[in-house]
């Protein structure tokens, strides 16, 4: 049977009996930009723009879902500041209104933290890429947090073999963790991740700051293997996935390392 040959009231078209009787794992919307107010830093509010992906499972006896209803529900929910605990409860509203058992909600956004330059004390905002992911499948419900930061990594080998220099590179740390508590303080995760690198990055550095950061990283060299092991031991009691990539400065390739711990 071809659906376009079925003549039916437009209000009921999604409820047309699905003659194919095929279950769909995920169907929904993606790449929807929507602004919202973020409440992550102990009650301090921050405006940002999120990139939303929302999907549900579709029972085999249904033809389709209300795509526009997803956006309508999201608009209504985001009138209130978004905390991790509030995001966790989104699934209840979506499951009820979309008549589905399973749901996947993902939002990616920039989170800004005020950083102070090490010597001159200039205050600037530094951005971090954060993602919240909520997945409900049957009775299993998981909330994930993804944090992506940039830092500096100086090569220990280059330092040893060179007379007065060492090559360094920008490293991209992607940290993916299961959030069992709904009051996770993101700033603590960011601080721990940055502290394992050779040095952090800043938006503004004056000359004296540049000297300090350069010398600090020179005294704190890290292979990518050192970096990923240090982070592992910081979070060894948690369930996480960790990926690090270094953009090499003197090689015609990049390097990466992966580590994960799930019980």
Image (cartoon, rainbow, N blue to C red):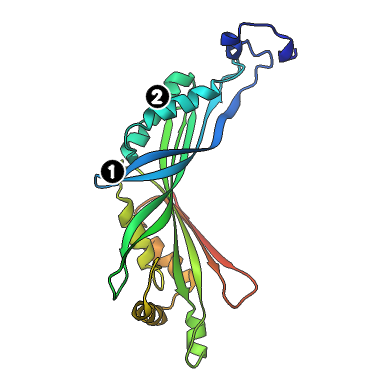
Q: Quadrant of the N terminus?
A: top right
Seen in the image, is 219 located left or right of residue 55?
left
- The residue labelled by disc 1 is 183
Q: Residue furthest top?
A: 8
Indicate whether 109 appears above or below 151: above
Q: Name the residue nearer the viewer: 113 or 17.
A: 113
Q: Residue furthest left?
A: 43
Residue 3 relative to residue 63: left or right: right
Q: 136 or 35: which is nearer to us? A: 35
Q: Quadrant of residue 121?
A: bottom left
Residue identified by numbered label 2: 93
Q: Secondary structure at mark 2?
A: helix
Who comes first in sequence, dot 2 or dot 1?
A: 2
Residue farthest toward the bottom in the current orientation of the protein: 163
How much space separates mark 2 and mark 1, taking CA atoms? 21 Å
Q: Quadrant of residue 209?
A: bottom left
């Amino acid at each position: 049977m071809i659906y376009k040959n079925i003549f039916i009231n437009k209000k009921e078209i999604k409820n047309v009996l699905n003659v194919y009787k095929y279950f769909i794992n995920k169907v929904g919307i993606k790449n929807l930009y929507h602004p919202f107010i973020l409440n992550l830093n102990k009650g301090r509010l921050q405006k940002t723009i999120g990139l939303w992906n929302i999907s549900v499972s579709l029972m085999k006896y249904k033809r389709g879902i209300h795509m526009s209803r997803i956006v309508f529900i999201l608009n209504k929910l985001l009138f209130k500041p978004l905390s991790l605990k509030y995001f966790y409860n989104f699934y209840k509203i979506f499951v009820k209104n979309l008549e589905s058992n399973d749901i996947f909600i993902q939002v990616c956004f920039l989170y800004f933290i005020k950083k102070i330059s090490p010597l001159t004390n200039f205050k600037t905002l530094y951005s971090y890429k954060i993602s919240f992911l909520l997945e409900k499948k049957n009775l299993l419900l998981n909330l994930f947090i993804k944090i992506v930061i940039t830092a500096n990594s100086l090569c220990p080998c280059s330092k040893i073999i060179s007379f007065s220099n060492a090559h360094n590179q920008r490293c991209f740390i992607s940290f993916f963790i299961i959030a069992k508590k709904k009051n996770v303080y993101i700033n603590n995760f960011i601080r721990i991740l940055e502290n394992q690198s050779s040095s952090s990055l800043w938006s503004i550095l004056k000359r004296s700051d540049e000297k300090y950061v350069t010398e600090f990283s020179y005294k704190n060299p890290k292979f990518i293997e050192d970096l990923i092991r240090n982070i592992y031991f910081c979070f060894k009691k948690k369930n996480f996935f960790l990926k690090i990539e270094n953009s090499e400065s003197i090689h015609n390739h990049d390097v990466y390392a992966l580590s994960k711990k799930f019980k």
